[in-house]
Image: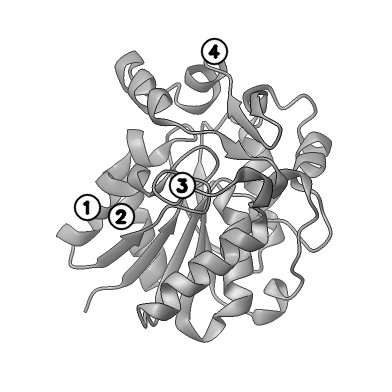
Amino acid sequence: MGETFVLVHGAWHGGWCWRAVMSALERDGHRAFALDLPGHYDNQRDHAEVTLTSYVEYVAHYISERDLRDVVLVGHSLGGLTISGVAELVPDRLKRVIFASAMVMIDGERPGAELERVAPGRPGSRGDKTGPFSVLVKPEDFPRYYIQDGSPDLASFVYTALVPQPTRVITEPIPYRGFAALNLPTGYIVCEDDLAMGKPSVWHPGFSGRLRDPVIRSIKCGHELMFTKPNETAQALSEIART
């Protein structure tokens, strides 16, 4: 019997970014769901009102209203913050939580400040403000630090589809504290050439090392694994889910 995956995107993206991975998962007999977080794509909100709590509550409601159970919850990049919070709200509905080159942070940390501490300068995360509460990655940074393993055409296609990121999600303190105590099984997908924070070690063992005994799978790719290695991503997710 297949697994049930709920896939959560990171900064600037939307649920659409998972389409190729979803197709690969579904070919293998799994169910896969992806959604637009508040303030992204079809889920439009005033960015002044979008917080990490907004993200967490939206995903938890998405899972509950569909009565999804034994969910393998996956978060990419900034999505790691979201899935940790969702796990606190609906732990009984989750089978495993998988971080795909994703942030793992604890109560009270401010994501932007913590990233500056572990990766001073954050070369791949400089952004252009698009409003008082939103930012978009610089066009020259995205192909160099995020999707350097993709073709120029792919990098251009993905970049033109990105949307501004609500900044309160990044600047405000993490509002949850019980994820580590849940003892939910976890997993981490390592992108071996991820330069989004300047060097791959920020992600692994940096963020991955904050998890308790995660199942690890590695893929030779940059940060945008769902675009450059969708089949390998789906395989890694399936292997972790079944471990």
Which picture quadrant has residue 6?
A: bottom left
Which badge, 4 or 3, is on the more N-terminal residue?
4
Q: Earlier in the sequence, mark 2 or mark 1?
A: 1
Mark 2 neighbour class, 10 Å CA radius: few under 14, some 14 to 19, many 20 or more: some
Return the x and y of residue 97 as percentages of the image width and height.
51, 67
Task: Estimate the x, y position of residue 215 in percent, counting from the top left.
Answer: 51, 64
In this rendering, which labeled residue sits more in front, label 1 or label 3? Answer: 1
Callout 2 amino acid: Gln
Q: CA distance from mark 4 to mark 1?
A: 31 Å
Assign a secondary structure to mark 3. Answer: strand
- On the question of residue 52 being in view, the answer is yes
Q: Position of residue 87 (x, y in %)?
A: 58, 73
Q: Are marks 4 and 1 in contact (CB under 8 Å)?
A: no
The single residue placed furthest to the front in the displayed view is 46
Q: Which residue is mark 3?
A: 218
- The residue shown at (43%, 74%) is 63
**Dot 3, crowdedness within 10 Å: few (<14), some or many (≥20)?**
some
Q: Disc number at residue 112?
A: none
Which x, y percent locates residue 131? 65, 29
Question: In the image, what residue type sits under mark 3?
Answer: Ser
Which label lies toward us, 4 or 3?
4
Residue 24, numbered label:
1
Q: Secondary structure at mark 1?
A: helix
Residue that numbered label 2 is attached to: 235
Q: Along the line of sight, which residue is nearer the eye, 32 or 27? A: 32
Which badge, 4 or 2, is on the more N-terminal residue? Answer: 4
Q: Is label 4 or label 2 in front?
A: 4
